[in-house]
Image (spheres, helix red, strand yellow):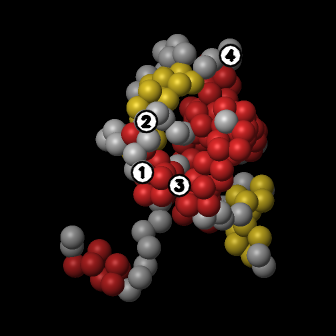
Amino acid sequence: MGENEKNKRDLGIAMLSYFFKRLLWLRQITFNEGEIKILGKNFFLFNLEEFVKMQEELKKEFGERGLKIIYLRGKSFSNSLIKTVKGFSKERVEIFENWINLLDLFGFGQIEVKSLEGKAYIRVNKNKFAENYVKIFGKQEKPIDYFLTGVFEEFFNFWFKKKVKCKENMCAACLNPHCEFIVS
């Protein structure tokens, strides 16, 4: 670490992503009087551990139906995000990039899309949801990212202009090195 970076860290100055800085500069993200707005939509911060516990409680109370609710909320969230991004980005590639940037900003992890030729292979590194699941409930036997599965499925319905299915085939909550999703 260079002296300049060390000084910034020591002063408590956080390094902001280019995308976040751009949103601030364009006044497309605001924090004002108890309100958080991003691209004209209201948001609120939610403790990730509580979201993990909520999913587990829905699973215990309702089984697969409870997990389907989480998955459907992910689809709805993604659909809303697509509409919002389309209002600010006209080119498809820019929509894709901004959608990925927003997911990063919201804390879903580092998302890499490996291929977009009829199928998508998605790797999520540093998935804090999965990491928190392990911290609270221990190693899981099967993937747990129902919300993110819905998020990816809905986006790639839009991207491929057809109905697709998304499946998480590797999960950090199962102590895999990362989460991996296949959309086809």
Q: Which mark is residue 138?
A: 1
C-alpha separation, residue under disc 2 versus residue under disc 1: 10 Å
Q: Are marks 3 and 2 in contact (CB under 8 Å)?
A: no
Q: Position of residue 74 (x, y in %)?
A: 67, 39
- Who's the residue at 65% across and 44% down the image? 60
Say which residue label 4 marks.
Answer: 163
- Front position among marks 3 and 2: 2
Q: Residues within 10 Å of mark 1 (few under 14, many from 20)?
A: few
Q: Name which of mark 3 and mark 4 comes first in the sequence.
A: 3
Q: Nearer the viewer, residue 171 or 115?
A: 171
Considering every residue shown, the one lying at the far left of the view is 2
C-alpha separation, residue under disc 3 versus residue under disc 2: 24 Å
Q: Name which of mark 1 and mark 3 comes first in the sequence.
A: 3
Say which residue label 2 marks.
Answer: 141
Say which residue label 3 marks.
Answer: 107
Q: Secondary structure at mark 2?
A: loop
C-alpha separation, residue under disc 1 versus residue under disc 3: 21 Å
Q: Residues within 10 Å of mark 4 (few under 14, many from 20)?
A: few
